[in-house]
Image: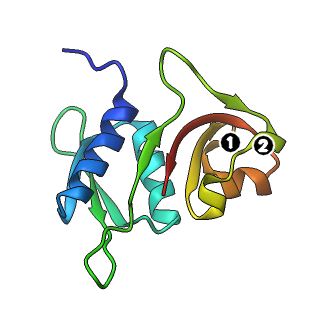
Amino acid sequence: MSMTDPIADMLTRIRNASRAKHNRVDIPKSKVKLEIAKALAREKFVSRYKVIDSDLQGTIRVYLKYGNDGVAIISGVKRISKPGLRKYVGTGEIPRVYGGIGTAILSTSRGVLTDKEARTQHIGGEILCYIW
């Protein structure tokens, strides 16, 4: 069975694992999902990620991060651009998620970037998701 939105599946797996207090979550590997995992690690939403090349496709193992009180660092994830309705923004239109507390992840001509990185490089693109 084919999946219509693999990025939404990745975000749902991370959200569910975070709410269930799991230490890690396994996600089928693709180039875009690997870049999203790298962006999450750069923004310190996850502690680390690891690529496991075991089968045909491979797996990305994302290690979730929790605070000292056991509360998950990731409190919410929202998919913005969907296969049926893409959302593109220019440089001046890049949104601030919860006043800068959260992060928007964009797919740009220079790769997958966070909103802060895209503003620094003065580049717009497709908003993949918000995470806070």
Which percent across, then down, holds residue 67?
34, 79
Q: Which residue is mark 2?
A: 123
Judging from the image, what secondary structure is the residue with disc 2 in?
A: loop
Question: Does residue 128 sit above or below 1 in this rendering?
Answer: below
Q: Position of residue 123 (x, y in %)?
A: 78, 43
> Is the residue under label 1 in contact with that under label 2 (CB below 8 Å)?
yes
The foreground one among 110 and 123 is 123
Label 1 sits on residue: 110
Q: Is residue 58 left or right of residue 78?
A: left
Residue reaching furthest front?
98
Q: Residue at x 28, y 63 (%)?
A: 63
Within the image, what quadrant is residue 54 found in? top left
Mark 1 belongs to which amino acid? Arg
Kindly identify the residue that appears in the image at 58 percent across and 49 percent down.
104
Question: Gap in Å between the C-alphas at discs 2 and 1?
Answer: 9 Å
Q: Is residue 31 above or below residue 69?
A: above
Q: Amino acid at mark 2?
A: Ile
Going by the image, does 92 lie left or right of 40?
right
Q: Is residue 28 visible?
A: yes
CA neighbours of label 1 inside 10 A, class few (<14), some (14 to 19), many (20+): few
Q: Is 61 situated left or right of 120 in this image? A: left
Q: Is residue 73 above or below residue 31?
A: below
